[in-house]
Structure formats: structure tokens, C-alpha cells
Amino acid sequence: CHQNELTMGVKMSPSPARSRACGVEDARIRYRHAVAYLEVAKTVMSETARPEELDYNHVAAGVAVLAAIAGSDALCCRLIGERSRGQDHRDAIALLETVRFGDGDIRIRARRERDLGKALGIVLDLKDQSHYGTTLLGTTEIKRLIRSASKIVEAAGQALDPEG
């Protein structure tokens, strides 16, 4: 993995059960997907909880999950050259928690990786319900999911363009 040691780094740990090699161009593509998914989620989501809008909020949640997964892929491809491809999306949390980037000492960067792993965990906790469930998610859950997805997508953008 070729990276600027002053701003990016990798904490070595075992890769998840299944992963796929990827590079910077893959990271850029997954980042563009993440941004598009997140924009759609924010556009579709309604701030009100009117019954006729709950289905749209449910769809917004499902698309926000896709944004977070694509953002996680972008981060991992950019920083460690692989992304999770296992059946269990939770493997992606372990992989995401191996990336370190940005400013700050090792403690700050380690906290950032834990926060990203936690954000992905929040999203994945609601994945099945948002993609396959018949019980609609509440506005509070959807806002939390979109905030978590936004955190991951923003970090991917920073990793791809540390100057911007």
C-alpha cells in the first residue's frame, strides 16, 4: 500500500474472511457511489412522520445503508488496498477499523478508526430492517442512520483528497 506516512497509515491485523484487492481508482468509484446514495437518501427522507411519507423514509434508510457500505469500501480501497466481500457485512467493520488517516497522533487516529467502525455498526444494525423489513423505521432511527452514513462518506472524501 503506497501512502503518505505523515497523514495515512495502516494498523496491521488479519483481513476478514473474504476480501478483494482494490486500488485508488476503485476507491474513487465507490466514493462517487457513496455520495450519490447519500444524496438520494437525504432527498427522499422526510422530516415529518406523516403516514404517507413513512415508506419514503424507509427507502431513505435503505439507500443510506448502501451509502455507508460504499463509503467504507472507498476508505478501505484507498488506505489498505482491499475491501470486504464476505457474506457477513460485519466483516467490513473489522476491516474498516484497520485504517488510520488524517491529522493527529496515533491516539487521535485510533479514535477516528473506532468511531468509523461504530458508525458502520449502527448502519449495519438497521440494514436488514431497512432492506427487507416490513416494520417501518422511525424518523429518529433514520436520522441516526443517515448521520452515521454521512460520517463514513465524509471520511472517505477526506482520505481521497486530504488537502480538500
Image (cartoon, rainbow, N blue to C red):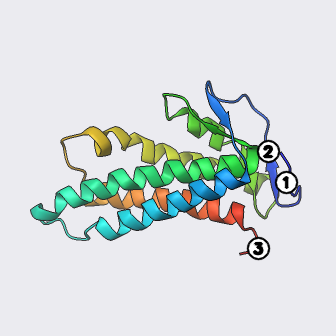
* Mark 3 crowdedness (10 Å alpha carbons): few <14, some 14-19, many ≥20: few
Is residue 122 something that shows in the picture? Answer: yes
Q: In this view, does 9 lie above or below 40?
A: above
| Amino acid carrying mark 1 in the image | Gln
In the rendered structure, the answer to whether residue 67 lies left or right of residue 55 reads: right
In the rendered structure, the answer to whether residue 143 lies left or right of residue 104 reads: left
User: Residue pushed farthest bottom?
Assistant: 164
| Amino acid carrying mark 3 in the image | Glu
Distance from disc 2 to disc 1, alpha carbons, whole Å, reads 9 Å
Question: How many labels, in total?
Answer: 3
Q: Which mark is residue 10?
A: 2
Compare marks 1 and 3 and give the one earlier in the sequence: 1
Label 3: element kind: loop
Pointers 2 and 1 in contact (C-beta within 8 Å) = yes
Label 1: element kind: loop
Compare marks 3 and 2 and give the one earlier in the sequence: 2
Distance from disc 3 to disc 2, alpha carbons, whole Å, reads 19 Å
| Residue in the foreground of this view, choosing between 157 and 125 | 157
Q: Name the residue under label 1.
A: 3
| Amino acid carrying mark 2 in the image | Val
Q: Where is residue 159 in the image (x, y as percent from the top left)?
A: 70, 60
Q: Mark 3 points at which residue?
A: 163
Distance from disc 1 to disc 3, alpha carbons, whole Å, reads 14 Å
Q: Where is residue 148 in the image (x, y as percent from the top left)?
A: 48, 56
